[in-house]
Amino acid sequence: MRYEKPQTVAEAARLLTAEKGLTRILAGGTDVLVQLKAGMVEPELVVDIKALPGLRSIVSEAGGFRIGAAVSGAQLGEDAEVRALWPGVVEATNLIGSTQVQGRATMAGNLCNASPAADSVPALVAAGAVARIAGPGAARDVPVEAIPVGPGKTALKRGEFITSIFLPARPARSGDAYLRFIPRTEMDIAVASAAVSLTLDEGGTITAARVALGAVAPTVRLVEAAAAAIVGTKLEDAAVAKLAAACSAACSPIDDKRGTIEFRTEVAGVLAKRAARIAYTRAGGQA
Amino acid sequence: MSISVSTTVNGDAVDFICNPEESLLDALRGRLGLTGSKEGCGTGDCGACSVTLNGRLVCSCLVLAVEAEGAEIGTVEGLASADRLHPLQQAFLDHAALQCGVCTPGILVAAKALLEKNPDPSDEDVRYWLAGNLCRCTGYDKIVRAVQSAAAQMRSA
């Protein structure tokens, strides 16, 4: 295995493209090093992207924030402005692993690890976040939901890697939230999870919403029918019931020791319901 | 392929040679003889290998040794000064907050990082912060009490 720490994006892309064997990107390393240790992957080349310009910074852009791909969960959680604009995204990211893992783990890495149970990803999808991808060609921007294509698999092509994740500006009276179910209070992997982002008009009626589910399908799932169920409502009980039903209908989970199909399907709806209520309150609505 | 790494550990400039796949934990223990950091799981679950990397608490088993280039590392060996234990170390002894001791160095490093960030944590704060440090002996109560005792002492110092 070779280790390289390039100083420019072009050099990183060149290294990754030139290597014929298996390559891995190293940002926080909290997934990659575990895979190396277990012998799950034996890369010829590891490219550490932490020295690339902007990869460790959070920058205001067009009313939103560009989060460098090597920004750790701890760094993100300390940013009061990001927390104020996208509290659901920050709380989801900060649920990943321990304090030690937060010191290194990144949202971009969580996205590229492509686990269906990734905590930050439903919140990013609900937020309408956009990943910026560098590679041998020109940089391109892709909605985060298009990155994972199956467990452990991404849509990134050979030589490509994420350099940042953009959290967009949002209108006044907006809120987001993320909830997961785990059998204990900390340090576990989501059995089911839900993220909701929404915007209200002055009267408290929902004008726009995005709902995403985790751990109930091969990839994190954007559920448009669930969003449609609450747009135009003030999150009355009937609307919330429709939201939960739409979420459960969108589930196609696995059955394993951590949760049955029935349990995950039911709980995804319940979590979406509760996350919607939190998002609604954060947006200033009177629930 | 061997790589030469120049880094700072507990304030001292050090150099070592390592392999690209070697973890920082292995380099600390095997190359530098700093065996305070322990390997419990090797997968970032137990926290026995906790160190600070540029001030940030991390599992040294999940850091490549080459990533230490130009960085500042803090390990349990840096807690005591000369012949004087750190208040956390003394509190762990006074409160019998350890039995076998394998988790203790990681917990001390993690607790020190907590108290630097939050000198007056609640018990809940301590428990959440240390959730990634597993102890199979004490049941945690004595650990939390020791951290709180050290925190109180450090606040009044």
Image (cartoon, coloured by chain):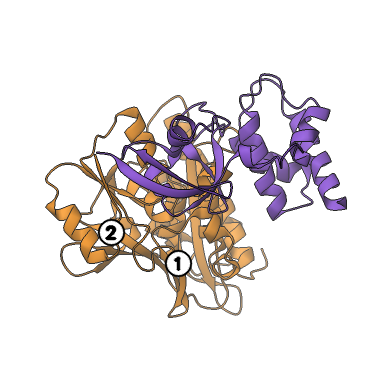
Chain holding disc 1: A
**Helix, strand or loop at mark 1:** loop
Q: Amino acid at mark 2?
A: Pro
Residue identified by numbered label 1: A57
Residue B146 locus on image (x, y percent): 79, 35
Are discs 2 and 1 located on one and the same chain? yes
Describe residue A260's horizontal placement relative to residue B148 as left or right: left
Q: Residue at x 42, y 49 (%)?
A: B6
Residue A86 seen by the camera:
yes
Q: Which chain is orange?
A: A
Q: Residue A108 lies in what quarter of the image?
A: bottom left
Residues packed near mark 2 inside 10 Å, few (<14), some (14 to 19) or many (20 plus) = some
Q: Colour of chain B?
A: purple
How many labels were placed on the picture? 2
Chain holding disc 2: A
Residue B153 locus on image (x, y percent): 85, 45
Residue A253 seen by the camera:
no
Residue identified by numbered label 2: A6
- Which of the pair A209/A215 is nearer the observer? A215
Q: Residue at x 60, y 58 (%)?
A: A277
Against A12, is A66 above or below? Answer: below
- Which of the pair A189/A68 is nearer the observer? A68
Label pair 2/1, CB-CB below 8 angstroms: no
Describe residue A232's horizontal placement relative to residue B84 as left or right: left
